[in-house]
Amino acid sequence: MQEWLTAELYTLDLGDKRLNARQAILLDKLAARPKDSLPGATCSWAELQAAYRFCDNKRVTSEKVLAPHRTCTIERIRCQTVVLIAQDTTELVLDRDPEQGFGKLTSQIGLLHHMQIAVTPIGQHLGVTRCHTWARPLVNPHKATHNRDRPIEDKESVRWLDGYRDACQIAQQAPETLIVSLSDREGDVFECFIEGATPERGKTAEWIVRSAQNRLLVPTDESTSQAAKLRLAAAALPVLGTGTVKIPARANRAARMAQVEYRAGCVTLKAPPRKEGKLPDIIANVVFVVEVNPPANAEPLNWLLLTSLPIDTLQDVLRAVEYYASRWQIEVFFKVLKQGCTVERLQLQKARRVETCLALYCIVAWRILHVTMLGRDCPEISCDVVFSKTEWQATCAVLTKMPPPRDPPPLGEFLKYVATLGGYPGRRHDPPPGPEIIWRGMLRVFDFALVWETRIENENTKIRDGCVQG
């Protein structure tokens, strides 16, 4: 078993030692073969059947599977000054029988997967703190009911409130760490703002949400009969400064640097009507980031951020924007989960089996990103912090065609070897290797380590046999 798994699963408790052992074996297999799914990762028909039984066991839930990793993640969070907890939802297209727990997506059948990851402001992945998978009904039972008339607990948007509450729990478990919850436009839920304004519940997490709704504001002038709208008020805020923001590449656009203006101020959001009772108005800080002179045929950058963080100075505003930009890490995580771990190719026929297996793959995806970003941020540390002795020795021996060094090389140097195995050309102007290159290289590292261990075992067996004969 890979050494990192022993520490990551130290507190695992599924109520049965055999189930604990099976999860460790499964994670070890999936981490070594993330793209091969269950049939390719397991070595025999018996192992594959054991994996199916594990995913189908009623005592095994995604929450219990993820629990030891969450514990380790919180320990890593406690060692940081600032931690950003990004949450988002992705669609998993799985063409299955809806009667087995699958539901409607935008245009296909599958599951919705909402999760939260903890990252540092420089992009180091600390772990997955929460995941939730569900199916949307094929026929919406609330279609005839106005969405605004339903309580938050009956809406899909309650996942954002649950996610923020979870971030607050982490803030209470890591009191010396500044926890900031990050949400995209779907997370523009008024109940989340209220939750952050209830200090009587204990320490809460700070929050940054990209606004999706042009909300009404409470008039600042008592003589004003009609409240202003959020976007109009944001556009009238004073410009505190200018700068550049990196816009990541997507399928239909290239990465670029955008020249932007920063506007900031404070507003009072008027509570929307709710059938179950009146909500309180909320004071929120606003950061408006607008691109100046965008290139032709390019969608201009336009971020309207609501936050509980202070925005008194330009430095405060830049910090809030920097934190929100780190939300992109969860998009990278989804890419690794879908393309690196190929979770949409799972052939499990029941939704609850898929949900359990997804929790395992979340840990695998975190491991890939953790190694990738740690090599960028801390290249000088020893590679044995991440890789086992047999892994770095075997890889060094294969690539240098010499006996492995006595001491492990630095992580940054060793990850160049791993990236080379994954097809990274390593030219002078090439960007650092990304997760896809690293996970391809890690597959070959695991193969080298297996052969290396087998060779050592054979040599030890010959020595023992020689001693017995002597």
Image (cartoon, grey):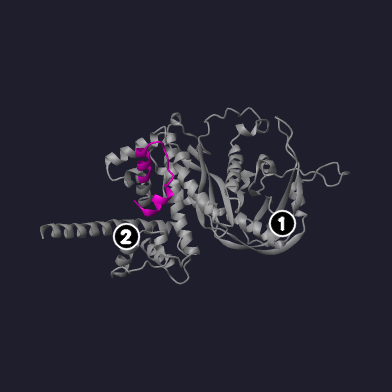
Which secondary structure, mark 2?
helix
Any part of residue 251 in sight: no
Any part of residue 6 in sight: yes
Q: Is residue 343 left or right of residue 292?
A: left
Which secondary structure, mark 1?
loop
Quadrant location of the C terminus in the rendered image: bottom left
What residue is shown at x 46% (from left), y 51% (from top)? 366
The region drawn magenta spans 1-24
Q: What's the residue type where badge 1 is placed? A: Ile
Q: Which mark is residue 311?
A: 1
Query: Residue 313 occupies which quadrant of the picture?
Result: bottom right
Q: Looking at the picture, how far across and down is residue 433, in whole percent?
A: 45, 62
What residue is shown at x 48% (from left), y 66% (from top)? 431
Count of numbered circles on the image = 2
Q: Is residue 17 magenta?
A: yes
Q: Is residue 100 magenta?
A: no
Residue under label 2: 390
